Image: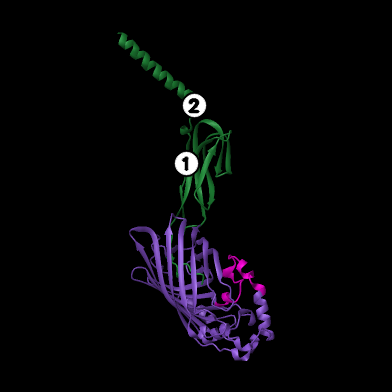
Chain colours: A purple, B green
Amino acid sequence: MKYLIFLLFIFSQSVYAQCPPADSGCVPVGEWQFSIALGAGVITNPLNDGDNIPLVIVPNFSYYGEKVFVDNNALGFTFYERDALSFSAVSQINRENSFFQRWHPNNIFVNSLSNSIGSEAQLDEVIDAIDGSGGNDAEIIEVELGQVQERKWALDAGLQINWFFFQHSHFQVKLLHNINNVYNGLNAQLALEQPFTFTAIPNNLLTLTVGANWQSKEQVDYYYGIDEQDKVAEELYYQGKASLSPYLKFINQYAFNENWSLKLTLQREWLDSSLTNSPLVHDDVIDTFFVGVEYAL
Amino acid sequence: MRYNTWTILLLFSFFSFTALANNDKPEDKSVIEFSIKPLICIVKKPGDACSMTATVSWQSPKIINSCLYQGITKVACWLKQNKVTAVIEINIEENMEYTLKDDNHHIIAKQLITINSSLAKKYRRRLRAGWSLF
């Protein structure tokens, strides 16, 4: 690890990429950026009995120093940066556990009311399933969230490459490995982002992103696999395999002025069959929707 | 002749009024010569604090008691002086107005000290696909 850090400094470059201040993708070096969005939205939960994550107040913050950056749940160190290309070492919280728990750091600001609705009924179902007293066992083909052992938070770290090309096109790839001994595997994220502006609507910015999330066998097996630790019938055991789930994201932002804007976000991720085949998974997509106003400090 | 008399009276009254107006002013602040040099503090990069030595000088047509303020903080005072040259240490983190006040705390002169950075504010690309929770 110390050799890796040493190498990062050896290859560290002090030259800044050209970034015009007026560009919405550029941020001032050494300053914190804060914004908060208030509105209505949801991230659907693909797990059986998993609660959808309501989006009501969504904070957003970042800090970009000369090399170090913090961007919401990610911490990074850029050791090479040129006009079009940058390489960074990054560490970030793994997303998957947010579907298994309510109190994920990303969910702190959302309404927890829906979590309590129907909780007694869910508890009864869980007890029935564990005791085998809920009726005919042969009818149970799904495993509910409450039946399986609690999953843990995973912290990942690895390499992030950003490539800027053509008219503000942005390609990003991350290759991360779990570093807190939770699933001991890899995951990768690919994203191709293209913003669009329209002369007829000068204050509007539309951004389309196509991407994919790859999860190693170890990650899928840890979160979506089922084994003897999960206290369910042996017939429901499931061993995870590597998955590749593509997604499409649409973000539209209309700026009223320097501080206030209207934001609309739509995203759909199509889950790989290695995820949807798990008895824990009910839906084959994860949808994200949010509409609201954002205030930037 | 009648025309000339009215003209003279009009001119007389105008100059009398002007002279009276000047006498009504409690103090003519413009006659205080006040300067701080240098006026601009150069720092390496935006946001850096400025530390420099500056020379303050002021001159008044009459002897006065006065104090120099950095914002609301008193920096130095002089008793019964009409001409002062002093060296002060300036430590500021943002543009700062220095004021010279008399006995009655009236501002009799002021000067703005600005901070400029030798390096322009830098920008870099945000390395994240816009607005995503993960």
- Residue type, label 1: Ser
Compare residues B67 and A44 and report the one nearer the observer: A44
Q: Which mark is residue A8?
A: none
Q: Does the magenta stretch include residue A116?
A: yes
Closer to the chain start, of discs 1 and 2, is: 2
- Residue type, label 2: Lys
| Label 1 to label 2: alpha-carbon separation | 23 Å
Q: Residue shown at 47%/49% (left/top)?
A: B114
Q: Is residue B16 above or below residue B53?
A: above
Compare residues A159 and A144 and report the one nearer the observer: A144
Q: Determine which residue is flagged by label 1.
A: B35
Foreground label between 1 and 2: 2
Q: Is residue A92 visible?
A: yes
Assign a secondary structure to mark 2. loop
- Locate residue B101, reporting x and y percent: 55, 37
- Locate residue A140, reporting x and y percent: 60, 86
Q: Residue B25 carries which label?
A: 2
Disc 1 residue crowd, few under 14, some 14–19, many 20+, Cα 10 Å: some
Contact flag, marks 1 and 2 (Cβ < 8 Å): no
Compare residues A188 and A276 and report the one nearer the observer: A276
The boundaries of the magenta stretch are A96-120
Assign a secondary structure to mark 1. strand
Q: Tell me which chain the residue with mark 1 is part of.
A: B
Q: Residue shown at 50%/29% (left/top)?
A: B27
Q: Is residue A26 above or below residue A181?
A: above
Q: Tell me which chain the residue with mark 2 is part of.
A: B
Q: Is residue B59 above or below residue A117?
A: above
- Locate residue A99, reporting x and y percent: 57, 76
